[in-house]
Image (tube, rainbow, N blue to C red):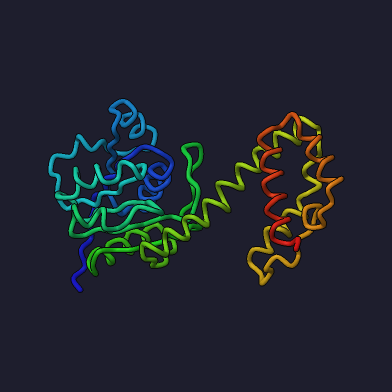
């Protein structure tokens, strides 16, 4: 197959994914990286901060890779706007279908990085796995070339597989992070030395990658120890969110293990 090295990348968006990928592409020294956002001032600030070229300075708008680092609700709009002039159109979503891009561009691809991004930190993409899908062989070649230029890993997943994995990631990552945040607030306010729980927490996380099917579940809910459960709920009376989650998990554990 004929190789086609695209030298110009246009990143649409100025958020966490845009920040990390822009930095990685610049570091690779294989592409000229441009940026554009919905807010003119934020775009200029983003370009200055990340040493990017503003898209408005690009005179010849052809042979471009467009990376849509935008919320899911904006992907279709951006695809319509840039799809016709894109050599390759890519989005980073875990849930939006590849079809949304294919309607607007012949060469389309998905590159969903299995990582949590924020503006406050740049992710080392060499340690990230990207779930990839593409509209054709040419698009597949281009997206893989891009990922390899970042020394990232990749795996091919279709829409259904990607959405299911995304749901799993939301529960394990986003939901658990929210629980961690509430627990950190509790331990700080109640002057609890949470470092004592490091070993326990590490062992719990590791069980996800074993054949453990729940047989190692422990705790007052598993034993249906209502006295301890009530004492815990009383301790959480000033923490309504955490108390509500405690009750929800307790009920779920009881339903699963108490017959």
Residue 248 percent location from the top left of the image: 67, 46
Q: Residue at x 66, y 69 (%)?
A: 210
Q: Residue at x 81, y 37 (%)?
A: 192
- Front one among 142 and 155: 155
Residue occupying the far top of the picture: 41
Residue 166 percent location from the top left of the image: 46, 56
- Quarter in which the C terminus is drawn: bottom right
Using residue 42 as the reference point, say whether residue 231 is left or right of it: right
- Front one among 234 and 9: 234
Q: Is residue 53 above or below residue 24?
A: above
Counting every numbered tag in the picture gives: 0
- Front one among 67 and 205: 205
- Front one among 234 and 46: 234
Using residue 234 as the reference point, say whether residue 37 is left or right of it: left
Q: Residue at x 72, y 49 (%)?
A: 250
Using residue 130 as the reference point, say whether residue 90 is left or right of it: left
Q: Is residue 34 above or below residue 125?
A: above
Residue occupying the far front of the picture: 259
Residue occupying the far right of the picture: 227
Residue 145 percent location from the top left of the image: 31, 63
- Quarter in which the N terminus is drawn: bottom left
Residue 35 percent location from the top left of the image: 29, 39
Q: Residue at x 40, y 50 (%)?
A: 24
Residue 153, by quadrant, is bottom left
């Amino acid at each position: 197959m004929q190789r086609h090295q695209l030298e110009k990348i246009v990143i649409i968006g100025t958020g966490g994914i845009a920040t990390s990928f822009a930095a990685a592409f610049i570091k690779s020294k294989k592409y000229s990286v441009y940026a554009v956002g919905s807010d003119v001032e934020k775009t200029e600030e983003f370009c200055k901060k990340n040493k990017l070229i503003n898209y408005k300075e690009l005179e010849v708008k052809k042979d471009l890779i467009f990376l849509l680092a935008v919320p899911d609700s904006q992907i279709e709009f951006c695809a319509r706007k840039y799809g016709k002039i894109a050599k390759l159109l890519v989005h980073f979503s875990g849930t939006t279908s590849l079809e949304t891009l294919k309607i607007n561009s012949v060469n389309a691809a998905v590159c969903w990085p299995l990582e949590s991004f924020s503006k406050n930190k740049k992710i080392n993409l060499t340690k990230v796995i990207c779930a990839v899908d593409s509209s054709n062989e040419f698009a597949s070649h281009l997206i893989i070339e891009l990922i390899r230029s970042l020394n990232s890993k990749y795996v091919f997943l279709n829409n259904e597989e990607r959405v299911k994995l995304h749901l799993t990631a939301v529960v394990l990552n986003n939901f658990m992070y929210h629980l961690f945040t509430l627990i950190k607030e509790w331990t700080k306010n109640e002057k609890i030395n949470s470092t004592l729980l490091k070993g326990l927490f590490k062992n719990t996380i590791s069980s996800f990658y074993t054949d453990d099917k729940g047989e190692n579940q422990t705790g007052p809910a598993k034993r249906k120890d209502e006295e301890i459960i009530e004492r815990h709920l009383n301790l959480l009376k000033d923490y309504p969110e955490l108390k509500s989650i405690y009750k929800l998990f307790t009920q779920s554990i009881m339903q699963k293990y108490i017959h």
